[in-house]
Image (tube, rainbow, N blue to C red):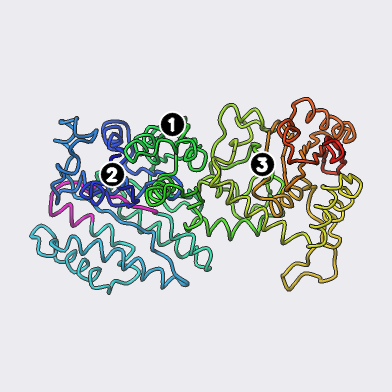
Amino acid sequence: MKDVPARHTPSFAKIREGNLYYADKTGFLEDFFLGSRADVNILARPRRFGKTLLLSMMTEFLDITKDSRALFEGLAVSTNRELCKEWMNQYPVIFLSLREVEGKTFDDALQAVQRQIGHVVACHKYLIESEGVSDRYKKELERLIHGSADCFALKHSLSVLTRALYCHYQRRVIVLIDDYNYPLAPAKSNGYLEQMASFMRRFLSHCLSTVWGNLKFGLLTCCLNRPPHVASDLLVKSYTLANFRFADTIGFTKADVDNLLAATGLLRKKRTIRAWYGGYLFGGKQEMYCPSSVLNHVNALLDNPAASPRPYWTRSSKSALAKRFIPANAPNIAEDLAVLLCGGCLVRQADRFPNPEYRDPSFSFVWAMLYQSGCLTRASKGKLKLCSGKPEYDGTGLVIPNREMHTILADMLVSWFQATVSVEQHNELCSALWKGDATDLVRVLEEIQQGRGTKEPDTADDNSGAERPLRENCCLALLLGCLLASFRKSCVHLDAGKDVFDIQVTDRDKAFILEVRRATRYTDDLEHLADEGLRHIATNRFDARLLAKPAIRTVLHWSVAVSKWGCTARALVAKAPSDV
């Protein structure tokens, strides 16, 4: 086995100098430099997919203060000698990350901007001694290094540094900004969004404007391409998750993962890693993997060959964002979340963010956030057949990409269920399912949806004695939430069709197959749909393995038909202890 450390680091130089595994993405340079590009380009990808590493690689390749030939030796870009001669270490580069710009107040955020800018300017402190830089610019640069710049000076700080670099080298400057719109998220949470958005527009436009002739090009990255769009004053070209160009530039392809596993002697884990960390569709490129999770799990396997896969995404800030945002919207999206967890597909507007104040669940901030942060991905052509809507007219077909995201979203559904349903009602649901009591199951579901006996809200302005009916029929969400809360390890979805979902649950010596059918028209007969569900279970022999196991003494078939106006259930005993 070849020993190739697989630690995740955003520094290209450290990776190459330390002989760490690197998925060669330098082919991007040829495509980007020689193909069509705008003066300002935005590349949007989920966090943990390698945006910072891409910008770090570009910095090493372009920076006029470096000699990067050894770092790029053997990589794809090194074979294009003409490109390397024209671009390698030929331009002054500004590489700035705004990932750490946050604070409880606008002044706190400005101090964070000052720290980041001060660090970048300090890397170019030789400009203060340059004969080509004017005294006025030198004074501005000194103030930035010493942390004494005011708000006005900070707005122009990138522009000053760009102009100073151009004057010193007499070459246009390349500006690379990582997480360019990140400061907007804490600004919105802490009530100074308008101030920060106004600041960021000036901060970016003064630097990235082509009017002064200082700029070669700018490349900005972001995770959530959300409003307000602080680069709207510029002529930009955006490459989102839906764009075909650069689709495989950020993230691991299947070939990247195969090469890594071969180098580490872990090819036997290929199927597991694909199931847990692959499944993303960027542009037309299926089988994209999350690099951070893959590398984390490879490291775990190198330390302990018996290590089980786990959701590493829960460590990230985007996980915290989702966990804060989902509970507030759970009453609106619980049923849709259950559809996704059962292997289904949804059509929602997700490529662009709506106004956050717009509350229509079918066009909500939450779907764009889940999609652009990597919790969901675009559906393949095969999965699109399961969608009720039409993606070409209604939005984007969305599915859960892998088991890592399935685990995280399942946790969110369980949290909603436990916050909505009392312990007594939870126990009644489980009891009715195992007894095969269809009448009791429907009764409990209706009580929960009408708000009778459910948990009281924690907010102070709610009426403590008022019933709180759920906003729409969410039987699938209630049933799946119940099963995941009680039988997480043995609850698996067997099949998903168009508005049809099959789930299997086992508990020691008993098991059941549950099919949920959703009516799509007012005229649909729920009784007929419930009967059809039982026939579907029998015809497809979903219980074949259960019936063949002597240890499973009881097998039930359940069919639940639901609509916006109610639900009907049927239960059938397929195997009883007396049959054994």
Q: Give the residue number, with chain letter if any, for mark 2.
A: 3
- The residue mark sitting in front, 1 or 3, is 3
Q: Nearer the viewer, mark 2 or mark 3?
A: 2
- Specify whether residue 59 is in view: yes
Q: How far apart are the two marked residues, 1 and 3, measured between alpha carbons?
A: 34 Å
Residue 433 in the magenta stretch? The answer is no
Specify which label sits upstream in the sequence, 2 or 1. 2
The earlier-in-sequence mark between 2 and 3 is 2
Q: Residues within 10 Å of mark 2 (few under 14, many from 20)?
A: few
The disc placed on residue 492 is 3
**Would you say 314 lies left or right of 485 here?**
left
Pointer 1: what residue? 244
Does 441 appear above or below 453?
above
Please tell me in which quadrant of the rendered image residue 144 appears: bottom left
Question: Is 144 displayed left or right of 43 in the figure?
Answer: left
Q: Which residues are magenta?
A: 162-179
Does residue 233 appear in the picture of this structure? no
Q: Give the CA separation, mark 2 to mark 1.
A: 35 Å
| Residue at 58% from the left image edge and 49% from the top image edge | 407
Query: What residue appears at the point 85 percent right and 39 percent down from the top-left corner?
Result: 576
Crowd band around label 1 with a 10 angstrom C-alpha radius: few (<14), some (14–19), many (20+): few
Q: Secondary structure at mark 3?
A: strand
